[in-house]
Image (tube, rainbow, N blue to C red):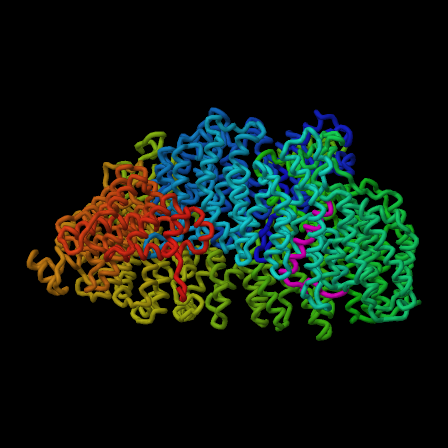
Amino acid sequence: MEINLPDTEFQLDVEDLDEAENEEEDLEHPGICGHAGLSRKFAHHYQQQLSANFLLPYSAQLDAESSLWMQEIKEGLAKSVILGDFRPGLIIWSTRLEQYMRLFGRKFTKEDHIQLVKLYFELVTDANMEVSLISRMCQILCDLLRKTELISPTDLQLSWRKLYETYERIQYDRDQWHGLLQVPDSLGTNFTLVLNCCRCYFPQDATREMLDTWRPLLCPHAPSMKKGIRYFAHFLPTVMAPGEEHWRLWFDEFLGLWLSFASVTSWENDIISLFCRLALDNLGRVDWTPYISVIFTKFLRNLRLPVGKKRVKLTGEKKSFDIASAAIWPACMLHEDLCLTALEDLFKAVELYFHPSNYGDWTAKLSSMLMKIPQCIVGRVNLERYKKPSWLPAVPVTAHLSDDRIRRFALAMKPILLLNMYSKHIGMRLETLFALKNLAELVPDLIVPELLERLYPALDSLTEPHRLTASMSAVTICMRSLFSIEQGRSHVLPLLMAVLPGIDSNDYRKSTCTFSFLTCLVSMVPLEDCSDSADRTDLSEEERSLCHASAGFEEFALQCFDRCLMYISNSTNDLHGRHDSVSRGTSHPYSSRNTCHPSSASRTISLITDINERMTREEKFTRLGMSSLVATIIYQCSDQICASVLQQLYSFVSSRYLSYNHYTGAAVASFCAMAVRLRPAVAEKVIFEPILKLLRDRVRIAAKDLAVNEEMDEEIAWTVKLAAEVLGSSGRIVLNSQRSSLVQCMETLLLTKCSLLYKLVVVLFRSCLRGLLLTFPTNMRSVNSEELDVAPDEFLPIRHWCQSIPQRSLKVEWYVPNDAEVDFAEELIRQFLEPALEILRFHADGSQPLDRKELERTLLLVEMFVAGAAIRFPFDSATVNQILPCETAVKIYSISPDPIICTSEREILIAGRPARQYLFDVIQPVLRKISLDDEDDVKSIKIILRIFRSLMFFRGLENEEVQSRIKGHIVTGKQLGRNLGFRNEQLRLLLFERLAIQHLRRHYDHRGSPLTKLRLAVLMEMIQLATGPYRDIRILGQNYFTDGMNNIRFAYRAFVDEILNKLDQSLGDVEQKAQMKGSLYLILGGRGGSLVNKHDWHTLAKCFPALLKVASDSRTATAIFDKLAERMDRNFSTTMICIHAAEGASRVADEMLNLLDPAVIGSTDERSAQRVVVWNKRLEESAENERLFLSLSHSLIDFVRERITKPKNFHFALFVLSFLVRRDVALSVDLANVFMDNWANTSSDKARALAKHPILSVMRCIKRPIIRTTLNGLDKNVPKESMGAPQAGIRSDNLWLCFDENQLPRNEKEYESTIFVDKAHHGYYGFPESLRVASPVKDQVVAGDMPSSLSSVERAVYDKMMEEAYVEILIRLMSVEDSKQHGKFDQFTYWIFRTLFRHFEDAFLPIFLPHLTRLVSSKDEHQHRCAAEILSGIVRGSKRWPYKKLLHMWDVVTPLLKTALANLSTESLADWGVFAQFANEGDARRNFPLIKIFFELPRTDTSFQSSSRLYVLQSAFFGSFDWRRKELHTKILDLMKDRIEEPYRDRVAWTLSNLFRNEIHLPTTNQSIQQTPRLVDFLTEYYDKIKALLLPPNHLNHLNHLNYLNHLIPGQGEPAMAIFKTLVKMISQTVILSLSFGPPQLQWFLPLLLRFENDSRDEELRNDCLTALACLSQIALSLPEIEEMLTQVETVVGDQTGNVPWRDRVLALGHLQTVVFNNFFTIKSNSDWVQRVHRLAVQNLENESLEVRETASVTLAGLVQCGFISLEKSFLDQFFRKSTTKYRLGEEKSAKALLTRHAGILGLTAYISAFPYSVAIHTPDILVILSGHVNDPQPINQTVSNAIKDFRRTHLDNWSEHKKLFSEDQLERLTDLLVSPTYYA
């Protein structure tokens, strides 16, 4: 299937496997009592177990293991929380809990489950918890709560307010923005997932409490709107017990709120996700019928599809809500008839956009949204029909989707799927394939036959490879559904034989699709000849036919094998080049990649050559698909067919020898290995023994030459390669062969002098040991009669094709090594490994030294033995506790840390000692000797590194192999799995593979492994190698060391000193550089994290000073420092210094401990005493942390102050210091001075940039607290609407907040007693119960006398800013061009000055005034930018100054601002616009002096000056709109009216549009008070002034036209035109910017826009009219707007006076088509509107103007095409009759007749054009009729000719299919028209 094509990469999360497992039912397996020794009652006491565990060969041991693990986890977690051991205790035991759930599922009691949830909930919501720990705990809490049905709200209740407070703290804490708190990037996402899991456990009164809390945030003009809606979207519970409908408290209110907005808002995603969640959780309980048309109109507009020929891109057009919501919501409403009808209309409307020729930037989004709907419907059907009963409310039966409804949906969607499956876009094609799969499961009889009809012709075509691969992929993904249709099984053998030619070495894409197709089909069909059973009397005719057909399976298998062998034989790889290696992701469990896992392959194949790099990507995927197919055929065929196939394979192997490192040899060898692994009984005699005999014979013949010849013997190499592959899959059949002769062969082969052959020989040992010692399942066939309860004599394979079975019925045979296999493995170790180790020992002590070659050979042998036998080498248990920061009673390591993987615990010893330790004791001296005597022996050191890595963690399988297997299973499950139905019933293949993976993943899960003495020693050696002189060794050592750090939590603490010591500068130059590079890379770390990001002050206090001593200028050092800074910037999070007790979590932990055995955990008194002792140590640890923090801070400060260092070190030190400004530690004066000094650093731009943010942090720390007052009872005066929603907008109760110039404070007493409210959302949507606002100025903390009243840190800042020289330098640096900022307004600079003037009030004004005067008087843009930044900080920082200081400030600032506004330039205009926006924020009553300056617009200014001042005014008021300034907005409107005729109309229009865009009418808006200036009043006023422009057309030029206007309207012609030009621009911008629906009066201007869009005399006006028309056609229209639009279009199009030019009519018809599509469902919901639109299109087919008639035809075709109207037979009959109208040329009456005849033809061609890529039911008849009009007079003949040409062009590609819809007579009449004549005709 195309899912495996090399041009796509799947990012599959391995956790998908666990998600699939979570869907399984609790296992009711007969082995529960037998295997586990448990009663059924006890087994069901657990919440949820992984059913695969009951089928593992060691399942009897798992209960004891899981009980031990769970006991340790509960004890470890509880003690870690109680004793404050968050690191490492809590982290390690949390990791252990995750591992437990991966391996055992939720195998704990409900009581344990609830306690764990409560524990992690309390940890997540603890106010003192470190943020990085919160993020980690969130992940585990999500895992615990993912299965909602396991715990009901009656069992568990969680506090929503605790979560809210935590969310507020981590998402909106201002300390984050100021740099005082560093939060992990993942925290927000993880916490959101926690909210999703927790909200169904909120108390019943939570909904009302949330509404009361967050409703006051809902102000559309303020950022709080997004915040409030996001709170509701995340917190509001929608899953409720039966009978509870708390959602009704907010449903109508929020839905009305959303529908009040026409454009996409910043919060629309959140509110739509809330509605989708409500619909999903309450299927059938919410009535969506009244809103369906509006919802679907929004969905359609969200797609941004192009309509019509003229399209203008709208600003902000790409904003839209997410795709998942757009798919889920319709699926949840599908039980509503209106929704299904709307979906049918939607599919019809967008069908044409899916044609491959209509690709555009909209295509991917359109496809992604619609292709997900079938998946949602399948999920819904599963919920309704197959979900297990639980506390979750069931879907009402009345809302269940019926089969008829599903069928209607499938019929509607099928056409677009069949078009989209041919897309060239791989992502779209994959989405379509899975949509087809989902639909095929729902209605297989509708989908599968259609796909087969497309596949069979494609197989016969040689010229359309894309059509073939697309069709084959579609059938592949729907393969399971093939067996669900009538006569579906009869297609199996024909399809198998038909697709075989697709295995073509010249077309890898087609071959890949063929391999996938055959693999999927064969995996469901046992290849067994049932022809002997055809005479049974109990067979149906179909079954009898299938029995006869099954005789062809053998022929198919042989032909398929033959083609595969031919394919690889025809490979074009050169003989020295290519070989296969492991590739990530697999489509089949037993492809060659799984018989030899990646790590092992890398140990062996890399010894020969880097084959992976020599293979092309295409060859990898082709090889993968071929391996999957071969494996499937081998395990699916009967013994007889299997023997024939394997005989053919062996004939191929034995008839030639292939290159051992060639693609052919690797492929064939892997086929042999799969045969031995999958069918050992058959392969033993046909493959295994003959290959070993072949090996023995060839070795015997070549024995003498091997011992002396250093040249490669290709024949021997190939045979050894082959034998190694089959031995690795042999299991115990190796014992059945001549074992002694095999050992003798190995002995002989080890004597070879050829190095390359030796490397192949040692692989033989590894493969043999793996084959002996690994445990794996064997009986993989898709059908097992024992599992089907069918008697053997009645079993008939054809009846069980594509058979699904429940997992409880699965019977698996395992190969489990017994004592004989282990004995043979020990024999090999004694005979070969132990002598090799002795040789190494003698080499290490110098008694028998080896040369390089012999040493390498010996080490290779040791490595392969370790790789083969490691599964029986247990890990040492001697743990190292030095990683703990202090002594604690928390045990951090388990008694049994490694999962069970064998039924027997028998250990293989070496020389009577534990293998791993013995091997290390031997290899370590060898490494030391190499390092001393032969340090450039890179090859040997690399081998030693690989051995060390295996000694640490390797247990027979590597993580990469299991991950690859898991991903392959996920992909295979997506292909072969069934989405519909019970998830625990699947194909046997999938269940079998899931079981195998459950066994495999126990081998590699080392996360949380203990740091043992052996691992400590190995890692120490790796550090030495990772910092050695040779690059390749360093890289390998660094990678392996990093892997070890990832698996052993907190192990870095044991190695920090060693790593940092390697940064020593005292060594020789070359050695020092290499050591320094290695150490830096170790500090940088891998994906596990860098040392500089560790949450340990001991480590950080050592790392940073050591790094700063690195004086190297090398590119490597510079690059690493940059990467360290990048990782810190991205991953550094605040680490706790003082350890606080988690009180709530401790209470839960105490409860957990009380339930454990007191004999194990101690008595209550003992625990209390222990707690006191440990917490005293915690206090000491906190004090030590603070000491380390201060020490680090001081050392970095001293380093920065010296400045005698490299720039990179200096910048890095300054960067690190920026992370050390915290709230919980007293701020250092020296630290503040460092940042202040570097803010004015004249030698480094980077230093200045690095100092800006920390200065904000410093100012945040010293910020004086704001005294706040509480206003109670305001909410009681708010008028309420239905369901408790408050009235929105300006009301009598909130008038005190609104700006009123007459009520402004006039003196000091009034000003300092006034409560200023800066947040714009307060009061708009009601008030909270208690409103907290800043107290009046007189109650605030007074600054005091400066500098005497200042603290030391404040004094440091104050002194610096009072230095004239410092300020001079600062101003000079700020007023030069900053290339990185591109001269833009710097918000950080603004914030710094704002905080400075807020804290020190007017102390710095005298210092800055001279500089500001100079800056604003200049014309230089950079000086103006600097002035704008400083002045905005002064104005905003003064908001809590005493009145006198404030008055003085305005006295000195006002002249500066006036000068600045007088000196505005094009370059500085944007900076002053930002100034105006920032400076005018907050309560306008405080900002009135500034507002007066903005309103000063002298008439004497030039146009540029006036335009610039308007821009500043506009920025001040509309950068952030404030509803409380209605009086000022009215003043702005009056000002714009006064200037509406001015030449700077662009700026006037922008100001007006910004003013009117914020006119919002919510359902709850107070109508008794006008909220803002109304657009409708403005339009009404000015329409009367310009409507006279709509004059009858004339032929005068523009000037005469204006004179004519002046004649009609004396003195008002030119003013009217000027007003109109301004209004046109305003209309465009208002439409683009407006949040809500416009008034119907906007449509009044439609005739004017149509008229002047055609006026070529004024190009600017024409373009503006075009833009306005495009905007009006693409916006969402309210119902009154639609009515008015139709009226205006009818006025233009239906004009009978002749006053409307034909061009106006043409534009109006095009405009109508676009409006209809963009408001499709809204207009279609009104039958009267539909008839009017239809009438407009049809009537204009008889217009006197040819252009109008043709446009009407195009419009009619577009309306039919999108499904807005349907041309029924009655309408077509009218066109038929009109097309036959008689006429006589030359007669006066004939003109009318000819017009009527042309109208009929245009109506018929519109029908043809409406179906450009298909043949509708009436198309053949219409084409025949049109053919009779080819010779009609003009313009009829031209219309017919064009229609025929278009039809031929659009139907050419599929004419072979389309012509089948025509009769013979019709084709004969159309041949001359549709087929171009030849040259010789």
> Is the residue 999 above or below the residue 1611 in the image?
above
Give the camera-side residue of 448 and 712: 448
Give the camera-side residue of 368 and 999: 368
> Is the residue 1503 above or below the residue 300 in the image?
below
Give the camera-side residue of 1525 and 1367: 1525
Q: How many marks?
A: 0
Can you give x and y, in whole percent of width and height, for residue 431 in the image? Answer: 52, 48
Q: For this view, does 1246 lie left or right of residue 1760?
A: right
Q: Quadrant of residue 1023?
A: bottom right
Q: For this view, does 599 lie left or right of residue 1418?
A: right
Can you give x and y, in whole percent of width and height, for residue 326 in the image? Answer: 44, 43
Q: For this view, does 1750 lie left or right of residue 126?
A: left
Report the span colored magenta.
607-635
Q: Is residue 1535 visible?
A: no
Q: Is residue 582 visible?
A: yes
Q: Is residue 358 magenta?
A: no
Can you give x and y, in whole percent of width and height, for residue 1736 in the image? Answer: 24, 45
Give the camera-side residue of 456 and 886: 456
Q: Main secondary structure of the magenta part?
A: helix
